Amino acid sequence: MKRLVFAVCIYLLGLLSSPVFAQKLKIIASIFPLAEIAQEIGGEEAEVRLLLPPGADPHSWEPTPKDILNLKKADLLLAVGGGLEPWLEDILAGLKAQDLKILLAAGEKGHHHEHLHGRDPHVWLDFLKDAELSLLLAETLAKIYPQKASYFRKRGQIAAQKFKKLHQTFAQTLQTCRFRVVPLAGHDAFRAWEKNYHLEFVTLAGQSPEAEPTPQALKKIIFLLRRLGLKAIYYDEPQALRFAKIIARESGAKVYFLTPGASLTKEELEEKISFFSLMERNLKNLSLGLECRLTKTGQN
Ligand SMILES: [Zn+2]
């Protein structure tokens, strides 16, 4: 009996001193969809921290000193790149000497001003790219933590399938719409959907989410709605609701919400709402406004 206890103690000591047993991978994700992908693939082997606080605008938010300290302790930073996060360039320069791995959803690192020059940083709204990112992230985690490689790869495959299915559901539903123009009190976040689903977004704010719309821009959308006979106006964040309401009042349209899903409210984060359910709600709202036949999704 004594020998057995002794053996068990030695075994437990071995487990405790093994870094593999003691540590979860620390992943920091810049925006909500990336945090969800990281958690899906890292599973119970990862501890995921979301940088962007509730309600913050990913285009203008800057990390606090505490966030930067956390970054220094992390194994992986998962960010969008492509000019979305204004702080990323500086952080990358400052962390060069560190052992932190960085994975950018938009591919190679870009400059902030590119957002204004036609490059689209909202890559997470391209579900086929999310599928690719899931596989790439699984490979990256497998490299950092080779003992769990097959665990990450399997989860990467499952996540990639879910994103492909989401893409198919969008494609099937949106090809049935009576209208293909999406008037949006908001900014140009949905270019991936224009490309993938043959929609045309007419936005009030253009490329800069913070810009106050001019009366001319408001009028343009009101006339467009009247001309098309379209009875829907969308808005992409709570601050844009009042403009959507003005357009609705002048055109007789109904107001619908369409979220890019990067930044959630405190309530949504507490509810643990998923990126997939946000996108399904978006699709439902598009179907209602553009008069499409909603395909049953069958996924959760
Ligand atoms: Zn944006």
Image: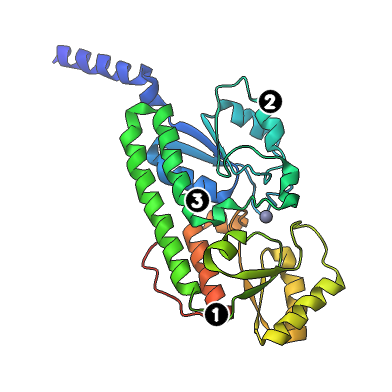
Q: Are marks 3 and 1 in contact (CB under 8 Å)?
A: no
CA gap, disc 3 and disc 1:
26 Å
Which label number is shown at residue 94?
A: 2
Residue pointed to by mark 1 = 288
Instruction: Indicate the secondary structure of the residue bearing disc 3.
Output: helix
CA gap, disc 3 and disc 2:
28 Å
Q: Residue at x 51, y 63 (%)?
A: 279
Q: Residue furthest right?
A: 215
Q: Quadrant of residue 163?
A: bottom left
Residue pointed to by mark 3 = 129
CA gap, disc 2 and disc 1:
47 Å
Instruction: Indicate the secondary structure of the residue bearing disc 1.
Output: helix
Identify which residue, 9 or 255, lies in the foreground. 255
Q: Is residue 20 above or below residue 4?
A: below
Quadrant of image for the C terminus: bottom left
Quadrant of image for the N terminus: top left
Q: Residue at x 60, y 38 (%)?
A: 108
Name the residue type under label 3.
Answer: Lys
Q: Residues within 10 Å of mark 2 (few under 14, many from 20)?
A: few
Marks 2 and 1, the one that precedes in the sequence: 2
Q: Are marks 2 and 1 in contact (CB under 8 Å)?
A: no
Q: Is residue 259 above or below residue 6?
A: below
Q: Residue at x 56, y 74 (%)?
A: 286
